[in-house]
Amino acid sequence: MTAEPIATTPEVTARVVDGALRAIARFGLAKLTVDDVAREAGISRATLYRYFPGRGAVLAAVVRSETERLQRGLDDALAETTTLAESLAAAAAYGARAFTGHEALQYLLETEPGAVLPHLCFSGADSLLRVAADRIAPHLCRFMGPLEARRTGEWLARIVLSYGVAPSAGPAEAAVLGAVSEFVIPAAEERATRSGG
């Protein structure tokens, strides 16, 4: 069954991305088909293929969309912060919620860890951590120099990622905030003071 006709490419992309995320959260990646995505998106297979040449293009659109969504969420989480400590806590809390609240990612971690962990651990995490540091650093430059902001952003991302991949017994957000409050905030404030930020 298909929904109303689709007018624009952005609308198609949004529907396909949402449908793909729902399908991944239900079926995982190994069994994911274009038919599953089309069904979840409420569009025909032909419509999906008109805009996306195949499964790889759909997954690339999902990665782009989720990256943009995470950046907007981070920007929103840090928009009202006025101190370094508030900014670090807000970024950490948002990161923990985004990681643990992402249904498709959590399903994959539970059922197909081999599809995700190579991108989240060891050398595979390097690219992810660079991107995270680059996205967090501009928000921290209000309080410290650019190099210190980038290093602090990466440190923060490493903590969120560590707790996300290997969750503790309690809620991930509380664990992340505890580590950030105890270790990251005091060290970052000291670095900011030393660097004149």
Image: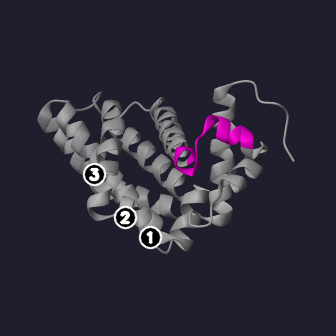
* Residue 36, percent from left and from top: 71, 56
Question: Does residue 47 belong to the magenta stretch?
Answer: yes
Q: Which amino acid is tagged 1? A: Gly
Residues at marks 2 and 1 touching, judged by CB atoms closer than 8 Å: yes
Span highlighted in magenta in the image: 46-58
Q: Is residue 79 above or below residue 29?
A: above
In the rendered structure, find residue 114 and report the number of the disc placed on it. 1
* Residue 171, percent from left and from top: 53, 65
Residue sitting at 20 percent across and 30 percent down? 197
Local SS, label 1: helix
In the rendered structure, find residue 118 and report the number of the disc placed on it. 2
The answer for how far apart the CA atoms under marks 2 and 1 are is: 7 Å
Task: Judge whether residue 185 can be spotted in this image.
Answer: no
Magenta residues, dominant SS class: helix
Q: Is residue 118 left or right of residue 52?
A: left
Q: Is residue 9 left or right of residue 110?
A: right
Q: Which amino acid is tagged 3? A: Trp
Q: Which amino acid is tagged 2? A: Pro
* Residue 28, percent from left and from top: 60, 64
The answer for how far apart the CA atoms under marks 2 and 3 are is: 20 Å
Colour treatment of the image = one colour
Residue sitting at 64 percent across and 60 percent down? 25
In the rendered structure, find residue 155 and report the number of the disc placed on it. 3
Residues at marks 2 and 3 touching, judged by CB atoms closer than 8 Å: no
Local SS, label 2: helix
